[in-house]
Image (spheres, rainbow, N blue to C red):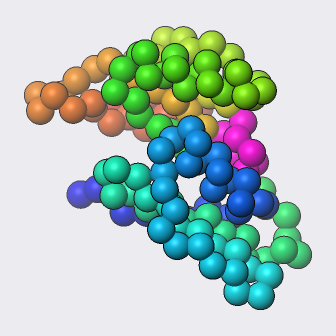
Amino acid sequence: MRLNHLDLTVPNVTQCREFFETYFGFRCVVSTTLGNRDVVVLTNEEGFALTLNHLDHTKPVQYPAGFHIGFMQDSRDGVDEINQRLLADGFDVDPPQELHGAWTFYFHAPGGFDVEVLHQSMRGADGKGQGSVVTGGQALL
């Protein structure tokens, strides 16, 4: 089983769209405005769909503490490269570090949520990274 899509409510759909396209290789396949409701659908090379919306401008967008989106990279160098691009573009990011079995860093994205960029050094028998769920800074493998 694989995850099909994630739908995020964000305060600024255009800004978040540009962020995901620039740093994580998403491309927009749908962009629409219905009245004052903005919706875009982005996809990546694995076929994962990320929907960004702002359907109710009367309510502020708030994420719960600890909410974040993780982006697995193929190598430590990939993590380092994204970290350096974000730094060069003015994002407040700490250097990557070894944490919960991964080479990783977290930062606050323009949409009001946190993002983790990581390379999981552990590999399964199929050569693919073993998934992990991070809760409260601890990995559950």
The relative height of residue 47 versus residue 75 in the rendered view (above or below) is: below
- Residue drawn at (52%, 62%) of the image: 28
The residue closer to the viewer here, 136 or 4, is 4
The residue depicted at 47 percent of the width and 38 percent of the height is 71
Q: Which of the image's four quarters has the N terminus?
A: bottom left
**Of 20 and 136, the residue lying toward us:** 20
Left-right relation of 122 to 36: left
Residue 2 lies left or right of residue 6; in this view the side is left
In this rendering, does residue 104 appear at all? no
Per the picture, the main secondary structure of the magenta-coloured stretch is loop
Say which quarter of the image contains residue 31: bottom right
Residue at 71% across / 62% down in the picture? 13
Relative to residue 64, is residue 21 drawn left or right?
Answer: left
Q: Position of residue 21 (x, y in %)?
A: 56, 48
Q: Which residues are magenta?
A: 108-114
Q: Nearer the viewer, residue 108 or 100?
A: 108
Rendered location of residue 91, percent (x, y) = 75, 28
How many dots with numbers?
A: 0
Residue 134 is one of the magenta-drawn residues:
no
Q: Position of residue 62 (x, y in %)?
A: 77, 56
Residue 94 x/y as whole percent = 68, 16
- Is any atom of residue 34 visible in this view? yes
